[in-house]
Amino acid sequence: MADPKGFMTTPRQDWPRRPVEERVRDWDEVYVPGALLPIISKQADRCMDCGIPFCHDACPLGNLIPEWNDLVSREDWRAAADRLHATNNFPEFTGRLCPAPCETGCVLAINQPAVTIKNVEVAVADRAWESGFAPPRPPERLSGRTVAVIGSGPTGLAAAQQLTRAGHTVAVYEKDDRLGGLMRYGIPGFKMEKHHLERRIEQMRAEGTIFRTSTAVGRDVGAAELRARYDAVVIATGATAWRELDVPGRELAGIHQAMEYLPLANRVCEGDLEVSPMSAAGKHVVIVGGGDTGADCLGTAVRDEAASVTQVDIYAQPGAERDEDSDPWPTYPKVYRLSAAHEEAGVLRTAPAADADARLFAASTLRFTGDADGHVRSLHLVEVDAQRRPVPGTGRTLPADHVLLALGFSGPDRADGLVDQLGLGLEPRGTLTRDAGFATNVPGVFAAGDAARGQSLIVWAIAEGRAVAAAVDRHLTGSSRLPAPIGPYDRPMVV
Ligand SMILES: Cc1cc2nc3c(=O)[nH]c(=O)nc-3n(C[C@H](O)[C@H](O)[C@H](O)COP(=O)(O)OP(=O)(O)OC[C@H]3O[C@@H](n4cnc5c(N)ncnc54)[C@H](O)[C@@H]3O)c2cc1C
Ligand code: SF4
């Protein structure tokens, strides 16, 4: 660190967000462009070089955080970019999208606001691109071995980049028309603009990775055929089988799954559609599910110019501070968080049915009722206690003509036939079975990311992509020099 007293003299300052009234009128990222770089070196200087960096351990990628904080505080951007890319293939994705468990594990966070690690990460990544510090790194020689990666989300992309750089010939099969998985057709542009994705994919093409879009393995190309054609197969197909809400009235028109709604909004931004056929414009929107997917629906509905929007969460509102008994430092605590989307809820033309941040906590949906045309008009709910038991006398009805279900995902979507064609084993919760070395029950076939881990995070997807690449490299050549983050890969989402 350039200044050993930086943490005492410099207060935490986050990358400022654009004014709400301005940003809800477009789909661009919510941050003020260019406002991060002038503040970030001083922010990196707040890292106190504590000696035992819990942040490094809290990051699933094992990012070398104190090292690049020091380099950024000294404005050695090239070295910082090298240290960052040593552990993370796509820091511009995590720097925008990660919930940053590193920051809740920061030693400074014991009694002060943490170092803005995530902001430092994104600043290094963006600066690396601007300055040419992230060139393609094609392999020096080819191994003659071939690998098929199925799925182009962060897991598949990270695995493919590592294996290509190790000299193998890698083809990525993607059933969508564009690459990127949930980063393309799930996560809205206001969280991450898609040009970040394009730039990495171009880098990967230049390194030699082959991409086959609009090709569903199991449907457009047989899974067994693929297995016979390649020396190894990596399944990185994600976990997009959504959970249902089995209550009376679910069959009414106007009730959609979040992942039916969000991809259409993304397609409007891509220029494929002029208007989304599921646009929430002028409608009373209720989002069932309190998680991040629900928050993405909220931000999208606000930009659609919904009449009102309410997000219903079955869990009670968490406290503002960490509960030291249940969530002691350095764990990732359950606390009240105000996402950019929640900040935006107040701009709607009519007041939302809930609080200013549009959320109704500790509420459970009982049923939907509709009009004579079979279209949903109301959502009936009740307050629940900590054991999710209804609290008598708390029934309430919300106007709802556009309902979005954001209740999570159970495992890989099996409609394409890939799982059955290969005879892949499944865990009771629906995810793919694999051993500690990422191998499935089918020889030469490996599984990683949400497909095997269950619904998780970009940072875990990249970590698994890097780790499965090392496992495949070992399988193909008997040893591997590819770095792999240290698990635990057998544990479902920890954040
Ligand atoms: C709406 C939403 C918002 C999210 N926001 C965040 C966030 O802000 N931060 C964060 O860290 N995480 C977020 N997540 C979670 C994160 O996106 C996932 O954990 C991550 O994308 C998983 O990566 P993956 O590569 O394993 O799978 P995916 O990203 O799901 O990619 C799988 C790919 O495989 C393809 N595929 C599937 N079957 C086949 C087949 N048979 N043949 C060919 N291709 C196939 C799919 O089309 C898809 O492109 C969000 C998730 C959702 C749903
Ligand atoms: S990837 Fe996530 S946990 Fe790791 S350093 Fe970046 S923000 Fe922190």
Image (cartoon, rainbow, N blue to C red):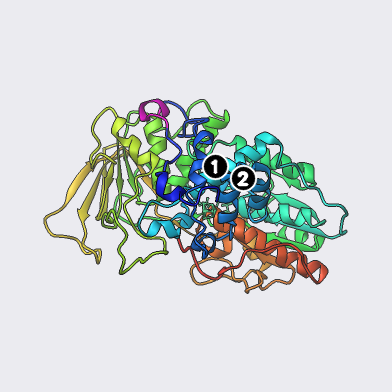
> Residue 274 in magenta?
no
Write down the quadrant of residue 422 in the picture.
bottom right
Say whether mark 2 is within 8 Å of ligand 1.
yes
> Residue 34: image x %, image y %?
53, 30
In the rendered image, is residue 469 in sight?
yes
**Residue drawn 21% across the image and 62% down it:** 385
Badge 2 amino acid:
Gly
Helix, strand or loop under label 2: loop
- Determine contact: label 1, label 2, CB under 8 Å: yes
Q: Earlier in the sequence, mark 1 or mark 2?
A: 2
Q: Residue furthest left?
A: 393
Closer-to-camera residue (259/366): 259
Circle 1 Cα neighbour tier, 10 Å, few/some/many (<14 / 14–19 / ≥20): many
> Residue 21 in magenta?
yes
> Residue 95: image x %, image y %?
54, 46
> Residue 96: image x %, image y %?
52, 44
Helix, strand or loop under label 1: helix
In the rendered image, is residue 97 in sight?
no
**Residue drawn 65% across the image and 46% down it:** 81
Q: Which mark is residue 242?
A: none
Say whether mark 1 is within 8 Å of ligand 1.
yes
Residue 448 falls left or right of residue 109: right
Q: Which quadrant of the figure contains the C terminus? A: bottom left
Circle 2 Cα neighbour tier, 10 Å, few/some/many (<14 / 14–19 / ≥20): many
Badge 1 amino acid:
Tyr
> Residue 293: image x %, image y %?
43, 48
Closer-to-camera residue (449/367): 449
Q: Identify the residue under disc 1.
A: 185
**Residue drawn 73% across the image and 72% down it:** 443
Which span is picked out in magenta?
18-24
Q: Identify the residue under disc 2.
A: 180
Residue 31 falls left or right of residue 135: left
